[in-house]
Image (cartoon, rainbow, N blue to C red):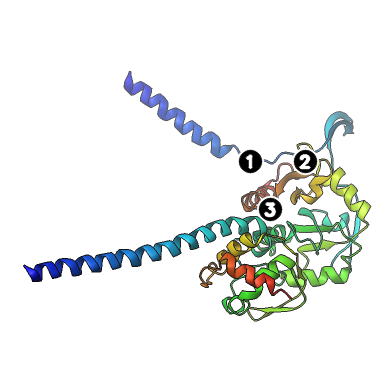
Amino acid sequence: MKKLLGAVIIVLLCNACKFNSNDKKTLPIYGERHPVTKVVNGQTVVDTDYQTIPPFKYINQYGDSISDKNLAGKIYVADFFFTSCPSICPVMQRNMLTVYNAFKNTNDVKVLSYTIDPKYDSVKVLKKYADKLGISGNMWWLLQGKKDDTYQLAEKSYLVAVSADSTVPGGYVHQGYFVLIDKQKRVRGSYDGTNPQQVAQLIDDIKTLKSDTVSAK
Amino acid sequence: MRSKLTVFFSLLFVSVITVMLFSCGDEHSVEFDRYYSSGSLIYQTQCQNCHGANGEGLQGLIPPLTDSIYLKNNKNQLACSIKYGLKGKLTIAGRQFEGAMPANDLSPMDLAKVITYVTNSFGNKEGLVNITETQANLNNCK
């Protein structure tokens, strides 16, 4: 009887291991979703329409015009900052540098830092800031645009995942979130950019997204 | 008998002196420890975001606190710099920095504690900077 019990336990344990290894990790998809009815090859099918980041147009630190078209087929991380920020920005940028260093040699991951103080943060100021931060190339863009547009984009699109459980409406733009966007422009995660453990999780999740071919249709 | 007594007394004398010496040493290091450990907590809440957990600063944007020569030469200015902020160009660890450090209106006691912490961490070893010294430095702020 004891032997049988032992055997059962061993079988269960093996299955548990097997189950875990087969269970490939996928990230949640945030935001509103709607069912849509489409006609594909004469058949009516119901698909899900997910919330995506709407089209936008900004200027980067090199003075180049950057729109959502430049991000087609890219995974990216977005955050909000301003160069004269004395409080949480430095720690956010320190943590974002680890993301930059992890993926700067890949061509399908980018970082977008939107300034929320476009009046002061001109292209020239952003370029100088980028140089001092030690970033070059086109992996990490510092973006300048209209302040109202940026707030709209932040609150309505990027931070949908954050706002759902934020008790301070409007405050989260300044709370240092990093938002992960997939190749289909959907929000797949949000992370506290001031917390190195959460940023390590973000790096893991980017790797998961990169290898996720099922939802990357 | 007499020599035995002498030996006894000299031993007693030596041990009393030793105890006195050690207790003095203890007194000093207890005070230092008190400043240093609460200084470390102040550092975490007031300085670490910018200057980093290891005083490493941030690239070319925020200077590190690992330049022992700078800290030694400017030891008497540190309280003023923290309390009223810093502006303009600085050369630290052989690199040029510009911009501003915001003013941080800490009490003289908290300034003394956090300066003791910073000037004895990240490779610095300046010893205790107590409240009296800090108060005196604050009176000479430019």
The amino acid marked with disc number 1 is: Lys
Q: Chain of mark 2?
A: A
Q: Chain of mark 3?
A: A
Q: Residue at x 63, y 50 (%)?
A: A204
Say what secondary structure mark 2 lies in. Answer: helix
Q: Residue at x 14, y 70 (%)?
A: B6
- Is tag 2's residue or tag 1's residue first in the polypeptide sequence? 1
Percent across and percent down for residue A138 are 78, 66
Q: Do the residues indicated by labels 2 and 1 lie within the same chain of the protein?
A: yes
Q: Residue furthest top?
A: A1
Whether A64 is drawn above or below A201: the answer is below
Instruction: Give yes or no for contact between labels 3 and 1 (Cβ–Cβ under 8 Å).
Output: no
Q: Do the residues indicated by labels 2 and 3 lie within the same chain of the protein?
A: yes
**B47 left or right of A83 in image:** left
Q: Chain of mark 1?
A: A
Q: Which residue is mark 2?
A: A161
Circle 1 packing at 10 Å, graded few (<14), some (14-19), many (20+), is few
Whether B37 is drawn above or below A124: the answer is above
Say what secondary structure mark 1 lies in. Answer: loop
